Amino acid sequence: MKHKAIFIRDDNGTEVSAQSPVIVSASRGTDIPAFYADWFFRRLEKGYVRWRNPFSGQDSYVSFENTRFIVFWSKNPAPLLPYLPMLKERGIGCYIHFTLNDYEAEGLEQNVPPLSQRIETFRRAVEALGRGAVVWRFDPLILTDKINIDTLLEKIAHIANALTGYTEKLVFSFADIESYKKVSRNLRQSCINYREWDEESMCEFASRLSTKNHDNWNLRLATCAERIDLSEYGIGHNRCIDPELISRLTPHDAILQNFLYNAKTDNGQRKACGCILSKDIGAYNTCPHGCLYCYANTSSASAFANYKEFATNPLTDLII
């Protein structure tokens, strides 16, 4: 299944070909809600964005003409919240993947707001959208000389207790550091003595988390793009662009429901990913959160430089 192609006019009045996806992902590559919310909603009003392929460097156009749903990804969606009524006015549904970690003591997420503030933002987002429309992610789970399984379970328990009544699901993944040379390099340069997960440690974590969850929160637990089967602990494989959740949140949108009925898995994602087809409009090396483990930035310095350059021309149709 491919995105429908149409013709649009860009900001200069030139007619160009554009793909017109039904579902937009905003974004796996950067934190659009935290840093580019103003830009995104200006572009929504304009009707399109320009997107640069990170591998080929080629630009293409993405029209919002047929968009019925947007999946947001963020560590701080507070700047997004005032814009949510605009989506409702346009008949566009959404949910938010809210990555709410606790690496404050270790300094792994250098520029995110304080944890207490992020928890409050999570609650505000739920009040605006409904509990199912804000998905809690603790992602990724990192082991270091200062963070072990006990530490991670304590951090998760603290947040889970604070989110009681506000979330129904927890999605997580295990940091795969050596597979991303830029990540291992950045962590070493920051003197973070990390350890890789193995199957034994993954299963120990899963078993203990499952027990805690059963005794305290009764959340649905799922991993993101992990090949390991943890079903014996009641932990499934997540679909972050999730047709069942989208369908549940938009029961009266016949066009979207028909699309979901026929939706195929997105073959452009990792092999263990269960997401259905969407169009991601983000860009790597543009998120200034400064997370030391980030897969999407080559370095914090390059991301800051790109964000600073973007700020000089925020009316552009392209993030980077």
Image (tube, rainbow, N blue to C red):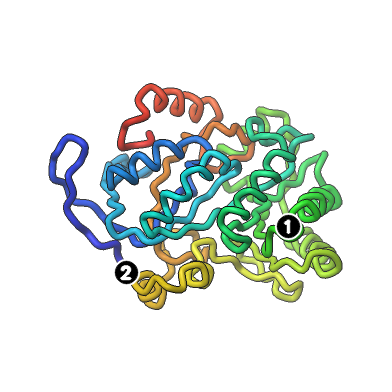
Residue at image position (33%, 42%) is 43
Give the quarter of the figure containing the N terminus.
bottom left
Residue at image position (62%, 45%) is 178
Q: Is residue 268 visible?
A: no
- Percent coordinates x, y for residue 117 in the rendering: 70, 38
Task: State the residue in front, 62 or 296.
Answer: 62
Tell me how far mark 1 sits from mark 2, CA to CA.
Answer: 36 Å
Give the quarter of the figure containing the C terminus.
top left
Q: Amino acid at mark 1?
A: Asp
Other-residue count near label 1 (Cα within 10 Å), few / some / many at <14 / 14–19 / ≥20: few
Q: Quadrant of residue 316?
A: top left
Task: State the residue in front, 187 or 35.
Answer: 35
Q: Secondary structure at mark 1?
A: loop
Residue at image position (74%, 43%) is 102
Other-residue count near label 2 (Cα within 10 Å), few / some / many at <14 / 14–19 / ≥20: few
- Percent coordinates x, y for residue 274 in the rendering: 51, 67
- Percent coordinates x, y for residue 82 in the rendering: 50, 43
Q: Is residue 154 visible?
A: yes
Q: Secondary structure at mark 2?
A: loop
Instruction: Answer with mark 1 or mark 2, whichever residue precedes in sequence.
Output: 2
Q: Quadrant of residue 238?
A: bottom right
Task: State the residue in front, 63 or 28.
Answer: 63
| In contact (CB < 8 Å): disc 1 and disc 2 | no
The answer to whether residue 41 is left or right of residue 160 is: left
The answer to whether residue 169 is left or right of residue 319 is: right
Placement of 257 over or under 34, stated as above or below: below
Numbered label tally:
2
User: Residue tagged by mark 1?
Assistant: 198
- Percent coordinates x, y for residue 135 in the rendering: 61, 58
User: Residue tagged by mark 2?
Assistant: 1
